Amino acid sequence: MARVGDRYGVELGCVRGLLIVMEFQLNQEAGEQVEQTARVHWAFVVPSLIQWVGFTFGFFLVLTKWKVADLSGLSWLILIFPAMLPVQAILIMVTTKGWITNHRVLGVTGVLSKQSMDLLREQVESVEVKQSLFGRIFRFGSVVIRGTGGSGVSLPGIEDPFAFR
């Protein structure tokens, strides 16, 4: 049995991640023990990094080969938008967390707008796992947990989603 303060809680290494773990510890019921912890796999960030590198390479190829614009001025601002893809993926990786305890299923995700789920294990109606080919190779995927009444939360990029399910 794992405890909340074990390696997954501290390994996030950021203030937001530690606040999520501390919030869970404060709301932990008496006698409740964590049976499974979910975190986002590092490979979740790789597709957005590949897109960013591809766009940047294409941008410089167009600028240097066809001389569409010079490398000064506002043309550098175009590189800011694709850089948001890996930043967004890293923020999702740092702020998404899930727990299965002997009483409840909990999930937290989000930076500016926070989405959280706290369901009794008996109220879990369905658990859906979505995995792409890239996710199957690196063993990560999205887990969608729905409770009675249709409420639920999606935890994207979870490491070994079938074990967490």
Image: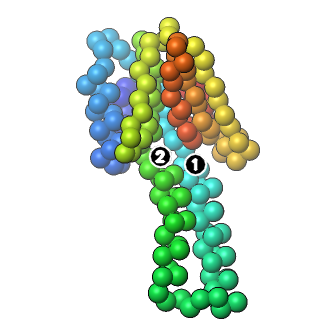
Give the left or right position of residue 84, taking residue 134 as reference. left
To which quarter of the image does residue 56 belong? bottom right
At which x and y percent is residue 73?
Answer: 47, 87
Task: State the quadrant of the N terminus.
Answer: top left
Residue shown at 58%/28% (left/top)? 144
Q: Nearer the viewer, residue 93 or 62?
A: 62
Q: Secondary structure at mark 1?
A: helix
Residue shown at 48%/82% (left/top)? 74
At which x and y percent is residue 25?
Answer: 29, 26
What colouring style does the render use? rainbow
Residue at the outermost right position: 133
Query: Does residue 124 appear anywhere in the picture?
Result: no
Task: State the quadrant of the C terminus.
Answer: top right
Q: Nearer the viewer, residue 135 or 70?
A: 70
Give the left or right position of residue 53, taking residue 37 as reference. right
Q: CA distance from mark 2 to mark 1?
A: 9 Å
Residue shown at 29%/38% (left/top)? 19
At which x and y percent is residue 117?
Answer: 43, 25
Give the left or right position of residue 75, taking residue 33 as reference. right
Residue shown at 59%/89% (left/top)? 69
Above or below for 70 versus 132: below
Write down the residue under mark 1.
44
Residue at the outermost top position: 122
Write down the residue under mark 2.
92
At which x and y percent is residue 23?
Answer: 29, 30
Check disc 2: other Cα within 10 Å, few if <14, some if 14-19, many if 20+.
many
Q: Secondary structure at mark 2?
A: helix
Question: Which one is in front in this view, the residue at disc 2 or the one at disc 1?
Answer: 2
